[in-house]
Each structure stands twice: as C-alpha cells, then as structure tokens.
Image: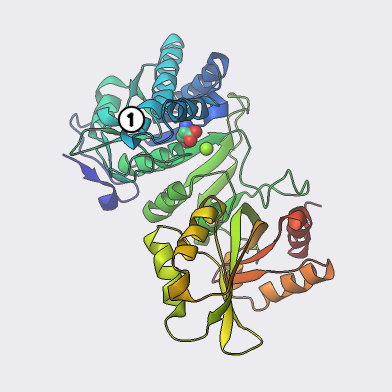
Amino acid sequence: MYTRLSELAKGKNFPLTNGLLRMPRLVMKFGGTSVANVERIRNVARHVKREVEAGYDVAVVVSAMAGKTNELVGWVKEANSLYDAKEYDVVVASGEQVTSGLLAIALQEMGVNARSWQGWQIPIVTSDAHGTARIVEIDGSGILESFEKKKEVAVVSGFQGVHQETRRITTLGRGGSDTSAVALAAAIGAERCDIYTDVDGVYTTDPRIVPKAQRLDKVSYEEMLEMASLGAKVLQVRSVELAMMHRVPTYVRSSFDDPADPKLGTLICDEEDIMEQQVVTGIAYSRDEAQITLRNVADKPGVAASIFVPLADANINVDMIIQVVSDDTTTTDITFTVPSAEYERACAVLNAHKSEIEFRDLQGATDVVKVSAIGVGMRSHAGVAARAFKALADKGINIRAITTSEIKFSVLIDSAYTELAVRTLHSLYGLDKA
Ligand code: ASP
Ligand code: MG
C-alpha cells in the first residue's frame, strides 16, 4: 500500500503495532561535499549518531560523493551523445548507491544500527520522465517498520526513484537529493528536514559577490521558492515546492560544524513564524538567461500567439516579455528571455516560423543577467521596485527588461554589471551586515 504524498499532513501518525510511544522522526540530508570521502562520511555518521542519541528515529538521505555525478554523466555522453535516458538513469543513480552503503557501514562501525535503502526498495515511485522525474508517491511503511522493530537508521540514496509500471530506475534531475529528502520527510511524518551542506545557511545574497551578505535565521517558504527559482543555488526548486506544499520545516545547515557543537543554520518555515519581516529579504541573480528581440513584427492580433505558441510547443520556457511600438506604428518590437541553454533552439524555432510571424530581424544577446529582489514585504509596501530602478540608473546600469510579481521583481541587465547591481540593491534595501 502506498502513502500518497498529497495525502500526508504534517506529523500524521502512523498505526503502531506494538502499542509503544513512537519516537519523533527526523530526516537529515547530506550533499556531495559532505560525503566527498570516507573520512567525511565518518563525520556525517557522527552527526547522525548525535540525533539518534537525542531520541530521534532518523532517515538520512545522501548525495553522491562530490564530482561523482558529473563523472558518471561524462561517461554516458562519451558512450553516446544521443544516449537512452533510461540507461542514463541507471548509470547516474549509481553514485548515491555507493554513498548510502558506505554511510551505513560507517554507522555500524560506531555501534549505530543502520541499513541502506535504494529508491526502488522503499519504493520512491516517480513519473517516467527519465533524467527529470517527479516523485508521485512514497511508501514510508518499510522505513517506519524498521524504526519500530529494529531501531535502525535508514540510509536512503537520494536523487533516485523507480517508475511503477516499467520498474525502471529514474532520477529526479540535478540537485534532486534535496527533493528526495523533503519528500521523505513528508512521507514519514518527520518533525523536520535538516539539509546539511557546505554553507551554514541561506544568505541575503551570494557572499562571494557581496561580502556583507548576512545569514538569515528564518526565511518563508514563498521567499525561498522565489530565491531558488531566481538563481540561488542552495536548494533544488522542487524541494522547496514540496516543503511549502507539505509544510515541512526545513533547515539549511553546515555539515562542517563540529558534530558535538552543531548550529541550526537557516529555517525555512511559514511566514507567520517570522517575527521581524524586512521588505526585501534577499537578492538573487541568474546568468542562465538569454534575450531575444524580434524587430518590426506586424502590430496586429495574433502575433504574440504566432511567436509564443511554437516556442511552447518546443518546450522552451519564456520568462520576461516586453512589447514596444516601433517608430512606424504599424509594426512592433518584441523582447523576451529564454534559458540560455535553449537560446540556439529558440532562434531556430523562430526562424523556422519567420513567414508566419513576419518579423524583419532577430537580435539576440546571451551576455545578460537577471537580478531579482525578493520579499513578502513587497505585498504591503508600494514603490519598492521604483527605488531600485533609480538606484541602478544612478550607477549607469541600463535595464533591458523588467518583470514584477507580488513578492519579487527582476531586471535584465548586461552581465558585466552583475556584481555592481547586486551590491547596489543589497545595500539599497538595508541588507548589508554592519
Ligand atoms: N548527485 C546528484 C547531483 O549531483 C543529486 C544531488 O546531489 O542532489 O545532481
Ligand atoms: Mg545540491
């Protein structure tokens, strides 16, 4: 019997078979740098042991050792650049299998009862979109039974699952172990999910660009979702969606802390649980953008559809869109952005539809960056974006496109100005560390 993820409520109780009081449950997730070698895996085991001794039933989700997945992907591409996605998943899912076994061994060696679980053994059931599969359901009962009957830590391979009908191994897309961890936390009714990584939390912006960036104690699900979607690399976007949907309190914290003296890091939680809200919580940037401008497109009904329908059919996501009237008033210019990885494909699709769209010129730029400010406080404050436009203009930064929504705004600028723009906005909204 499967427990549907969507049916899970926070802290839902599972039937007890022996009448004993159930221990609180915890999911701990460790990323690639945290398990990069056997010594670090031992350090992870110490963190796990601490939580077991504190009275938790623990499920640990692990990534592949740092660099492993890239190496595996490289081998697949070397074997055939037009590879079969099902076999790609067989190969790349293997990195996590290695780490789960090694961590179980390291725990056993410290006297902690533990076993490894592969995605198909639980099972973590996914769609059949090989390489980018989505979790459909997780049966948490096997793990709960091993907690109850054997007091056994479950060491789970992240990133991987299985498609129910075909029984083939699937993977969740790069960075997918975060998603495995949050989904598992929801499925077993864990009190929270701790994501251990090589940084000690979520920052107001990238500290490599702004040394005055500050670690946030708390950030809301909504804001974290925007930050991750708009370029902050700390968590896979899907994992934040799941945390938000199932209300799983999630910490981002460092595995390099002394296991005997751990720090909590940043809590991703409900907006209501955050006392002091800033108007702007963080500044994100993404270099994975490309701009396309179609010049002198006929200004008549149906043009937008003639451009964006073929792009959608080709599965290309369009983000920012602006349309301006050209000098001659019978034609218009349309500018929009696509992911830079899709830039060439997008140009090919547009050129193939040139006669229907009737544009004169296609101009593109890939040396652009999208800089965004995020904060739930924008809902209740007017003029937040306007201040940014002024501050950027004062620095001589030209804005190519703008988008806004309830809790964020983004500007597209020349990538040469990335650092300057991020720093300018970071200080403008009072986020600099004193
Ligand atoms: N090992 C996988 C990757 O590198 C999954 C993960 O680490 O989250 O993308
Ligand atoms: Mg990651």
Residue 355 position (above or below residue 416): below
In the picture, residue 43 is in which quadrant? top right
- Horizontally, is 417 left or right of 107 in the view? right
For the question of whether residue 273 can be seen, the reply is yes
Q: Secondary structure at mark 1?
A: helix
Viewer-side residue, 45 vs 309: 309
- Horizontally, is 422 left or right of 63 in the view? right
- Horizontally, is 15 left or right of 89 in the view? left
Q: Which residue is mark 1?
A: 87
- Horizontally, is 86 left or right of 320 in the view? left
Viewer-side residue, 213 vs 401: 401
| Residue 341, position as x, y percentages in the image | 53, 50
For the question of whether residue 63 can be seen, the reply is no
- The residue lying at 38 percent from left, 34 percent from top is 83
- The residue lying at 34 percent from left, 28 percent from top is 90
In the picture, residue 159 is in which quadrant? top left
Q: Residue furthest front?
A: 355
Is the CB atom of the residue marked by disc 1 within 8 angstroms of ligand 1's nearest atom?
A: no
- The residue lying at 35 percent from left, 49 percent from top is 10
Q: Residue furthest top?
A: 109
